[in-house]
Image (cartoon, coloured by chain):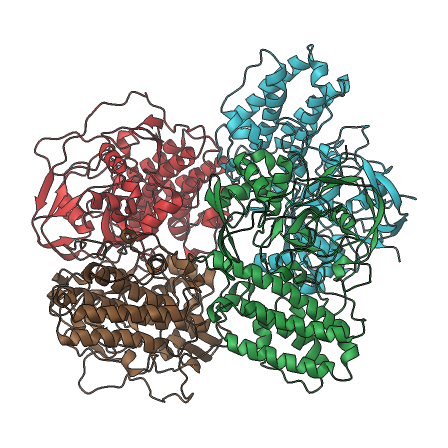
Chain colours: A brown, B red, C green, D cyan
Amino acid sequence: MSGTKSAARRPDVSLPSHIYRRLFETRRLSLDLAAPLSPEDMTVQAMPDASPTKWHLAHTTWFFETFILTPYLPDYGIFDEAFGFCFNSYYEAVGARQPRAYRGLLTRPTSEQVFAYRAHVDEALDRLLSGPAADAVSGLIEVGINHEQQHQELLLTDILALFAANPLRPAYLSVARNLPTVSATEMRWIDYAGGIHDVGATGDTFAWDNEEPRHAALIRPFRLADRLVTNSEWLQFMQDGGYRTAAHWLADGWTLVQSEGWRSPLYWEGSGSVWHEMSLNGLLPLDLAAPVSHVSYYEADAYARWSGKRLPTEFEWEIASAGQPVTGNDLSTRALRPVAAARTAGAGPQQLFGDVWEWTQSAYLPYPGYAPAEGALGEYNGKFMVGQHVLRGASCVTPSGHARATYRNFFHPQQRWQFTGVRLASEID
Amino acid sequence: MSGTKSAARRPDVSLPSHIYRRLFETRRLSLDLAAPLSPEDMTVQAMPDASPTKWHLAHTTWFFETFILTPYLPDYGIFDEAFGFCFNSYYEAVGARQPRAYRGLLTRPTSEQVFAYRAHVDEALDRLLSGPAADAVSGLIEVGINHEQQHQELLLTDILALFAANPLRPAYLSVARNLPTVSATEMRWIDYAGGIHDVGATGDTFAWDNEEPRHAALIRPFRLADRLVTNSEWLQFMQDGGYRTAAHWLADGWTLVQSEGWRSPLYWEGSGSVWHEMSLNGLLPLDLAAPVSHVSYYEADAYARWSGKRLPTEFEWEIASAGQPVTGNDLSTRALRPVAAARTAGAGPQQLFGDVWEWTQSAYLPYPGYAPAEGALGEYNGKFMVGQHVLRGASCVTPSGHARATYRNFFHPQQRWQFTGVRLASEID
Amino acid sequence: MSGTKSAARRPDVSLPSHIYRRLFETRRLSLDLAAPLSPEDMTVQAMPDASPTKWHLAHTTWFFETFILTPYLPDYGIFDEAFGFCFNSYYEAVGARQPRAYRGLLTRPTSEQVFAYRAHVDEALDRLLSGPAADAVSGLIEVGINHEQQHQELLLTDILALFAANPLRPAYLSVARNLPTVSATEMRWIDYAGGIHDVGATGDTFAWDNEEPRHAALIRPFRLADRLVTNSEWLQFMQDGGYRTAAHWLADGWTLVQSEGWRSPLYWEGSGSVWHEMSLNGLLPLDLAAPVSHVSYYEADAYARWSGKRLPTEFEWEIASAGQPVTGNDLSTRALRPVAAARTAGAGPQQLFGDVWEWTQSAYLPYPGYAPAEGALGEYNGKFMVGQHVLRGASCVTPSGHARATYRNFFHPQQRWQFTGVRLASEID
Amino acid sequence: MSGTKSAARRPDVSLPSHIYRRLFETRRLSLDLAAPLSPEDMTVQAMPDASPTKWHLAHTTWFFETFILTPYLPDYGIFDEAFGFCFNSYYEAVGARQPRAYRGLLTRPTSEQVFAYRAHVDEALDRLLSGPAADAVSGLIEVGINHEQQHQELLLTDILALFAANPLRPAYLSVARNLPTVSATEMRWIDYAGGIHDVGATGDTFAWDNEEPRHAALIRPFRLADRLVTNSEWLQFMQDGGYRTAAHWLADGWTLVQSEGWRSPLYWEGSGSVWHEMSLNGLLPLDLAAPVSHVSYYEADAYARWSGKRLPTEFEWEIASAGQPVTGNDLSTRALRPVAAARTAGAGPQQLFGDVWEWTQSAYLPYPGYAPAEGALGEYNGKFMVGQHVLRGASCVTPSGHARATYRNFFHPQQRWQFTGVRLASEID
C-alpha cells in the first residue's frame, strides 16, 4: 500500500487504553498473517516492487524501534545495530540501507531472529506504554499502528505475487473449491449534485498528512456506479477485442499492452471463455460475479473508455462515500479475495470499503496548502507526489479499521499486483 | 512541443484572406528555419524523443496531404504512396508507420525530395484555397497551421539536441560572443485574489481540444513571481548542494539525479563558478541574468522546495496571464535563447509568453466534461493524458501568434531538451 | 562447475561395491554441505548464474530419478510429477522447466520436501543397486555421482555469492580469525619440451565426453610457473594501476572494467593496502600468500600481459600435470578457501588440483573428431562450446576424487563467482 | 571487416612505384564507392556495429594523417585539430574519441568538409612520397592501404544495413531484375591428407600481425566441400524446421533464435517458399543457386549439425586454399552480391576468395609465440582475441588484392550484417 510512503502528522492524541490494545492487536495480527508461511516463503521477493514477509515483519518493528523506542525509552537497547541497514525502507535521513530490489537476498537475519526482534521490541513497547512517557508517544504509536497495517496489506499482496510465480501455484490459505454462486446485481447509477464541497481529513480521526489540509473543492454534478465492474463484464471487454484495440488506450498503456503482451488482468490464466484466477486461495475458476481485480490504471481507463464512461475523480469518490458505513469485504472477513456484492435495501454505493482499491482519474498531487512535516518521519511526505494516480476505498486485504472516506492510496499507472479495480462514473447529461 | 499530440476541434471558422496568408507564411517559415542546415543536419535524430528536421518538414506536409488535400481536393495526386509510412507520426487509424526511434534512419527520401514534396503540396493547397472548397476547409487549415507551428518549435529544439551532441558544438546561427550585460531585475511578488474563475478556451480564437471545455475553477489566493528564475539564482541552488541533497527532491527525481549524474541544467558545461551553455548560437558563456532553461520538472520542483516556495498550478498561471499582452521573447525576436527581463513600468508578470515554457505542478489531465473529437484527426486527443505535467506560456522558439493564456503544453517530468524553466509561486500567509 | 553442462559417455563400467559406496557417500556429502544452512539460505538465488542450495539438492536427485530410476526400476513411483518442471536444468528433450533466473522463487517445495525427495530416491537407488539391474546402470550411476559432485562445488560457490551479497557478511563456516602466517614461496619456472603429445581422456577412469577423443597435439616448448599467482602479487598489479591501464586489457574486458567499476577481484573489500576478502569463513583480512581467486578471464589475461607472461594453453597445463599426484587443497581439507603453497622437496608444479581453477588461453571447443552422444543425457554435449574458456585443475571446493589431469572446466570470460585464479606460462627464449 | 582491428608489423618493404600507384588507386576507390550516396546516406549509422560512410572516409584519412603525415612530413599542417576526436576509432593511446554508437550524430563536419580533408591529406601524401622520406614510410603506406581496403568493405556492408532498415528499400546500385538463371553445381567433397603443415603468414606479401608467426600445425585428414552452401539448401534447412529445433543449436544460439525471433538469414523477407533478399541492388527475388549469406556463426554451426557435417577449422581452410588462385567474386566484379559458382574443369574448391566470408569453428586466438607490436599502431593488436570466431576467404565486397590464404577475419558469433556464409567439412571415415 503506497500509504507506507507517507507519514502522519497528528501525534497529539492522548493514549487511551484502546490504543494500547490496538497496538498489540496489530502487532499480533502481523504474526497471524505470517503463520501459514514457511521460513522460505517469508524470505523471497517475487519482484522489485514486492518485499519479503520477513522484511515487512522486521521493517515495521524497526519503525517502532527507531522512531519511538530509541528517542523515548531511556534505557532501550538496540536489538541489533545491523538491522537499521537491513530494514530501513527509504528514509534518507536515517542512513544507508539495503537496496529495495535486493531485500530478498537477506536470508540472514533468519525468520527466527526476526521473531525474536519483534518480541524484543514488543516487550519494550509494553514498558514504554506502562511508563510516564505513554502520553507523549500516543500519537507516534498511532502512526506505527497505521504503518504496520499498511504493511499487513502489502505482506499479503506480495505473497500472492510470489505464489503466482511458483509453478505449483500454492494457496496461502486453502478453501473448498465450490465457489458461492452469487450473481452480480445489475449495475445502477446514483446521481450526485455539484457545488462546493469540503474534502480532506476532518481531524476527527487519524489521517495521513497527504489527506490534509481539508479544503473546499468545486464539483460538477456527476453519476457514480453503485457497484464495481465485475469479472463477467471484463470478459466482455476482452471478447470485444479490448486488449487489441488501440483506440481505447492511453498511448503509454498501449505501448505496455504490446511490449508486455497483456491480454487479461494480471492473475488470470486461460483463454477464450475458460479462465482461472490465481488467488490467495490458490488457482480458482474465475468468479464471474466478483469484482475484477489486479488491473492497472491503463486497463481501468481503457475499460471505462470502451464502456462509454469514465473513471471518477478522487473527490467525486470521497463525496459519494461520505456518511457511508466504513465496512465491507476487508481483511476481517478472511475471504482474501473480492466477492460479489449483495444488494442491500435502499443502499447507496456498494463495495466502497473492501474488495478492491478503486482507480481514480486524479493524479496524486498535494492538496492546496500542503506542507511537509518536519523531521525524518515526515522527511519526505510529498516525495511520491508525481507520476502516480490516487486510489480510493480499501481492498479484501486491508486491515479492518484502516480505511476511511478521505484515505488516499496511490500507485503508478502500470502497477497491477495490488487488489485494484474499477468503479465507473459519468457526466449527468 | 507536446501540443503536436493533440488535435483541435474548431473547424468552423470561415476562411478570411488572412488565413490564406498565414498558411503560406507558416509554410515559408519552416523552410527558412531549415535554411542554415546541411542535408546531413536535416536527417539525423539525436535521440528517440527528437525527430530529424527533414521529418518535421515532411510530416507537417503529410498532415495537409492526408487530412485536407486527399479528402477535399478531387483530383489531388498523392506525391508518393510510401511517404504515408515514413511520415505518419502516431495516428493508429491512418496505418502503420516508421517507428519513432528510427526516424533518423530515413536517409531516403532525400531532403531534396522532401522539398519537392512540400512544393507539390503547397501548389495543391493554393489550388484548393482558390476553389469552391476553401470555406469548408478553413478550420482544418487553421489546425494545419498550428500543427506546423508546433513542429517549428520542435525542429529548433531537436537541432539544438543534435548540435549539443556534436563534439564541434556547432552554432545553428552564429552571433557575436559579447553578450548583453543586462542585469536581472529583483524578483517581486504579485498577489492574486481567490474565488471562482473561469478557465479554458474562450472560443474567441483557435484552441486545441485539451483547452476545453471552459469551466469554473475554485482558486485560493496566491502569489506569483513577476519574473522567471535566473541562471544566477540556479547557480546558488547548485552551490548550496542542490543536486546533492535528497531532501529537496521528489523520490523519482532523486533516483534520476543519481543514475544520470545530473549536476546542472541539461546544456550547461563547466564546474564551480565557470559555466558555459550550449545554445542555438553555439557554446556561450553562461548568461547569469537570463532565465534558467532546460530543466526537468524534477529540477524545477526541487528548486522551488529549496527556495521555500512552490510551482504554480496551471490555473494560477492562467488567471495571472489573462489580459496580459501576448508578447515576449518568442521566435520572432530571433534571439533563439532566453534573455533577461527588462522591467517595464507598472507591469504585471514579465516573460509570460516567451523565453521558456513554465512548469506547473498540475498533472496533464482532461478538463471536466472533456470528450475526444471524432475521426482520425481527433483519434487520440486524450491519449497522452497520463504521467505528464502541464507547462504554460511559450519559449524563445515558439512561433509568433501561437501562444495564448489558455495554451496547455505538456511533457514528462524527466524531459529536459525543450526550453523549460521556472516561475515560483507561494501561498499568501 | 560448467561440467554440469556436459554428459559422459562411458556407461560400461561394471558396478563394483565401491561404486555403491561412493554413490551413497556422495549423496550423504550433499546433505552435509547443506547442514550449516537455514531453510532461507537454501532457497534464495543471489543472481541468475547461481542456483539455490535446495535446487541443487533436488536437481541432482531429479537426475537419478529421470535418467536411472524411471527407466530401470520397474515399480518406481515418481515422487512428485511437478518436480520435473521445477528441477530440470536445461534438457530440452525432457520438457519444459522453471527459467534459470527464477529458480530462487521456488519457496515451495520446501526444503523439508526436498529432503523427503532425496530420501525417497535414495531408498529406490538402494533397491535398484541391490537388484538384477545393478550392472546395467553402473555407468549411469557413475555419471550421476560425477554430476552431483559438480553441483556440490556449485552449491558452495553459490552460497558464497549469496552471503557476500548480505550486509551481515555471514560465514558459512566460522573459523578462528588468526590466519596461518605462511609465506608464499618464490615463484619458479619449469621448462617442458615440445613435440607431439597425446591429450584427452585416457579411458582408464571416468571422463566427460568433452575430454574425448584422446588425440595427438603438437606442442612447442614452454615454461610454466610452479605455483599460482598470489594475492600479494595481485596487489602489486593493482597498485601499479592494473585496473586503470587500458593497454593491459582485451577490449571487451576493458569495457567491463569501466562499466562494472572493477578495481579488484570479486570478493575483495577495502582500498589502498588494507583489504579484506569475503569467504566461506566470512569476511577475513586478505591472506597475502594465498592464491588470488575470483578473477575473470579478462583479469587473468590482463595480469599475465602486465607481468610480461601469458596464460598457458589447456594442453600445456595437461602435459605438465600428467603424472602429478591428484591431490591438493580441495573440498576434503575443509579449508574452503585457497591457501599458500608449501614448497615440497623436488616437486613439480604445486597447487595443480585444488585452491582455484586455472584459466587457460584455450577457447572451449570440441576436440577433433568429437561427436555428441545419443539421447537426452548426451542431448547437448557440445552445446556450450562457444564463447567460453577452458579452466584446468580443481578448486578448494571441488569434491575429492572429482579432479583429473584431463578435466575440462569452462566458464565465460566475464564470470568471477567461481574459485578461479591464475598460473603463468611463457615461451622459452 | 574486423581486420580493421589489427595492425600490421611489416613496415620494411621499400616503396616501389606500384605502391604509390596502389595508394592513390585505393584512395580513389573509396570516393568511387561513396559516389552513389547522398550526403544524408553518408552520415547515418544503422546500428552501433556499423559506421557512417563519412566516418569511414574520414577515419581512413585520419589514419594516414596521424600515423604517417604528422610524424614523417615535417611541415605538415593538421587539417583540423577536432578531427582527431571525431575520427579516432579505438586507439586508446591516441586520445579520447567520439563513442562508437554516436558516430552517426556527426552531421558536422559535413561530407564536403570530409572530401576536402581527403584532398588535403592526399596532396600531402603525394608530397611525402615524392620526397626523401618515401622509403622510410613505404611499410606504413602499405598498412594504410590495407586499412582503407578493410573500411571499403565495411562501407558497403554498413550501407546495406542502412538501406535494409529503410522502408523504401533503396538500391545502392540498381540492376536489371532478371537474375541469371545459373544453377548451383552439385556439392562435391575433396579429401586432404593429415600431417604437420605450416600455417600463417609466409612473409612474401603484406600480412596483418594476427597471421603471425608462421608455425607448424598438426592436422588430421579431412574433407571439404568444393563449394559454398546455397540459398536453396538453406531453404531446406528452414523447411525442415531448422530454426525451431533446439537440438541443432549451440545453447547461446538457441537463446538468440528465440529472443530475436530469427527464422531466416538476416536480409531475407518472405515466408514459405517465396522469399526476397535485400541486397546492394535493392530487394531481389531470392537467388536459389547463390551462396547463403548474412548468417551468424550460430546459424552456420546449426546448419552444419543439421546436415551431419561440421564447419572447417581455420587451418583446414588454409591448407585447402594454399596454392589456389586468389580470385573470385570480389568487389572487382561489381556484382555486389554472392553468385552461383560455375564449375571449372578439374578444379579444387570453388568460391574461396569471394562471395562470402566463411565461418570456421576456430576461435580467434593468438598464434603460438604471437607478441603484440610496439606503439600506438600496434597498441592493441591482440585486444580483440576473445569471444570471436575466425572467418576465412573474402566476400563480394572485398577489394581486389586484399585477400590471401592466410588472412584471418573475425566476428562475434551473433553478428550477421557482414557477407558471411558456410562451407562444410567433415571427418574422413
View extreme (right): residue:
D346
Residue at the image point whose x is 68% and y is 10% from the top = D131
Q: Nearer the viewer, residue D418 or D247?
A: D247
- The image shows residue B265, relative to residue D283, as above or below, that is above
Instruction: Give percent across and percent down for residue C428.
Output: 77, 35
Query: Which part of the image, by quadrant, shows the C terminus of chain D?
Result: bottom right
- The image shows residue A194, relative to residue B267, as above or below, that is below
Q: Is residue B287 visible?
A: yes
Determine whether, in the image, residue B320 is placed left or right of residue C48.
left
Determine whether, in the image, residue C64 is placed left or right of residue A145.
right
Q: Nearer the viewer, residue B206 or B417?
A: B417
The quadrant holding residue D337 is: top right
Residue at the image point whose x is 64% and y is 62% from the top = C332
Determine whether, in the image, residue C41 is placed left or right of residue B151.
right
Instruction: Give percent across and percent down for residue C22.
Output: 70, 71
Query: Which part of the image, by quadrant, shows the N terminus of chain D?
Result: top right
Q: Nearer the viewer, residue C50 or B104?
A: C50
Number of marks drawn = 0
Instruction: Give percent across and percent down for residue B429.
Output: 7, 49
Determine whether, in the image, residue A102 is placed left or right of residue D183.
left
- The image shows residue C195, relative to residue A272, as above or below, that is above
Q: Nearer the viewer, residue C51 or A258?
A: C51
Q: Is residue B106 visible?
A: no
Instruction: Give percent across and percent down for residue D236.
Output: 74, 60
